[in-house]
Amino acid sequence: MKSPIRTGLPAALLLALATAAEAHALLEHREASTDSAYRGVVQIMHGCDGRPTTRVSVTIPEGMIGAKPMPKPGWTVTTTRGPYAQPHRSFHGTVSEGVKTITWSGGALPDDQIDEFTFLARVSDTLAPGTSVYLPIEQDCTEGSYRWREIPVEGQSARDLKAPAPAVRIVAAAQKTAPAAAAGPVKAGDLAIETPWLRATPAGAKVAGGYVRITNTGSSPDTLTAAAIPLASRGDIHTMSTENGVMKMAPLPDGLTIRPGETVELKPGGLHLMFEGLKGAPKAGESVQGSLTFRRAGTVPVTFTVAPIGALSPGAAAGPAPAARGHHDH
């Protein structure tokens, strides 16, 4: 491994790298709340002694679960899975395995340019505030490589290490204000539409889950065929099922029929609305105007309240981590 210390760098770059051992690989977000989503952004500041970077790999620490990489044009993304040291709570029970490493390869990042490699994960409630977790990073170039994987032992400072792994400090979850309660059911013919709500999404996300409770008080069935919000290019109804312990999601091409006298609730982990092609991120505490379209009742305006990322109900805080099975968490 080449020494992780370089000399002769411009002053501005030296200032930007003023962390332990003048690291080449940095994390944009160095704090994360327990029992919440974490957006990991690995920043590669330069190559290996002038050579372009061709591979970046990050090891996901114990306690960060459900990790998913963000695709990167011109790079191939691969993951390896393995067992967790202990089971973790999820929306669908517990999970005992998940993604342990994420690798981007096949690209070419010139030495005089910087770039970011992004993944999403969730901080388990098993990680206590005040502790730190470490994300070892590997950087390979056309010639040479770096291994940022040293982890300090108790009482040792990362500054004493030659190639320290970037650290994320775990902090207590911030108090979040719950969205305002809905004014009451929206009536559309024989239908009563209650508590439409969305989950907030991380910046850059392209899909969002929506939920609602619908009661048919009439004598004829009606069918929910579509949903819409200004932030999304389209909205469909999806169902979830479990096959061999793996959650799978599929659209309902013929819509969702609500029979006379029936109440149907779209909620996390089951039937839900899928909003795709997001042009912005719904934020917790906001209200989003939208609509639901029915075969008989027509298009009905509704107001979606926005709950925190991972919330299990419209007025709840974020819930436990999603199962690490490669499906969307809706």
Image (cartoon, rainbow, N blue to C red):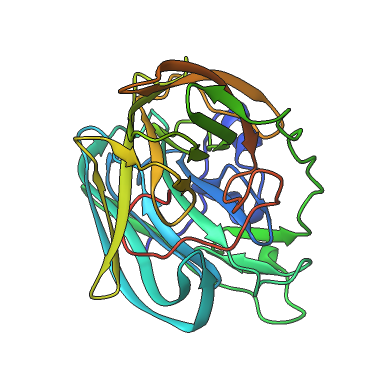
Residue furthest to the bottom: 86
The residue closer to the viewer here, 40 or 65, is 65
Where residue 51 appears, x then y in whole percent?
28, 41
Is residue 124 in view? yes
Residue at horizontal 31 percent and vertical 43 percent from the top? 238
Q: Is residue 61 above or below residue 222?
A: below
Q: Is residue 195 above or below residue 68?
A: above
Q: Is residue 11 above or below residue 88?
A: above
Residue at horizontal 70 percent and vertical 30 percent from the top? 184
The residue closer to the viewer here, 186 or 78, is 186
Residue at horizontal 73 percent and vertical 27 percent from the top? 183
> Residue 319: which quarter of the image?
bottom right
Is residue 136 in view? no
The residue closer to the viewer here, 36 or 81, is 36
Task: Assign the N terminus to one quadrant of the image.
Answer: bottom left
Where residue 33 appears, x then y in whole percent?
70, 55
Where residue 312 appears, x then y in whole percent?
59, 54
Where residue 247 appears, x then y in whole percent?
31, 63
Residue 136 located left or right of residue 302: left
> Residue 285: which quarter of the image?
top right
> Residue 228: which quarter of the image?
top left
